[in-house]
Amino acid sequence: MARILLMEDDVDLSTVLDEVLSSNGHVVTTSQSASEAFNLIAKNRYDLLITDIIVLKDDTPVPDGGISLISRLRGALSWNLEPWMKKMPIIAISGAIHNQGMSELLKISRDLGADMAFGKPMDTDDLLQAINLLTKRSG
């Protein structure tokens, strides 16, 4: 069982993923933006973060998405974070990779520090295997 923070702006997908993860024994907290997710991380300890890369408001991408969250946890400013925050495994997810000019988003998220990345829709069995692998690895 892992304590998972899921940052996903699509409420329907968030609900489905929450149900899948919960039914597999994980405790899931959801958020819809990077700023909300970071505030939750500052107050609670999680074993793993699943973050959407692109967050939309009124069908327009906003800078409050997974790229900023991953950068904040893994980037130059992470020095002032708790050690567990900097080491928390991160899985990046995105459906935007199917849009023109966005195919590199998963690679970019890994370059910034995500441990794994999946395009949406993703196979939930693959996601569950990734969660098990990453949470075992981080111990």
Image (cartoon, grey):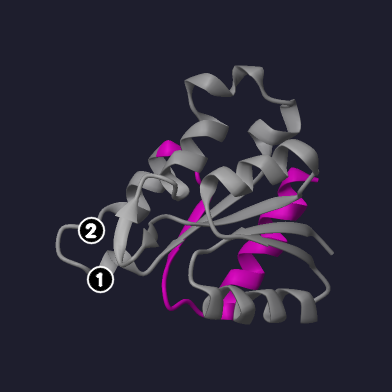
Secondary element under disc 1, as helix, strand or loop, is helix
**For residue 23, which quarter of the picture?**
bottom right
Residue 86 % position (x, y): 64, 32
Q: Is residue 12 left or right of residue 96?
A: right
- Residue placed under numbered mark 2 in the picture: 102
Secondary structure, mark 2, is loop
Label placed on residue 121: none
> Could you tell me which residue is drawn at 53 percent across and 20 percent down?
77
Q: Which residue is mark 1?
A: 98
Q: CA distance from mark 1 to mark 2?
A: 7 Å
Q: Which residues are magenta?
A: 112-139
Q: Quadrant of residue 95?
A: bottom left
Q: Quadrant of the N terminus?
A: bottom right
The vertical placement of 111 against 2, above or below, is above
Residue name at image x 53 percent, y 47 percent: 34
Q: Residue 62: image x %, image y %?
A: 35, 50
Labelled pair 1, 2 in contact (Cβ < 8 Å): yes
The amino acid type found where label 1 is placed reads His
Q: Quadrant of residue 133?
A: bottom right
Check disc 2: other Cα within 10 Å, few if <14, some if 14-19, many if 20+: few
Residue 67 picture location, percent across and down:
42, 44
Give, as a three-letter code, the residue at label 2: Met
Left or right relative to 18: residue 65: left
Asked whether 71 or 111 is in front, the reply is: 71
37 lies left or right of 136: left
In this view, the residue in front, 80 or 39, is 39
Residue at 74% over, 44% down: 138
Judge whether residue 122 is colored magenta: yes
Residue at coordinates 65% horizontally, 71% vertically from top-left?
A: 128
Query: Mark 1 packing: few (<14 Cα in 10 Å), some, or many (20+)?
Result: few
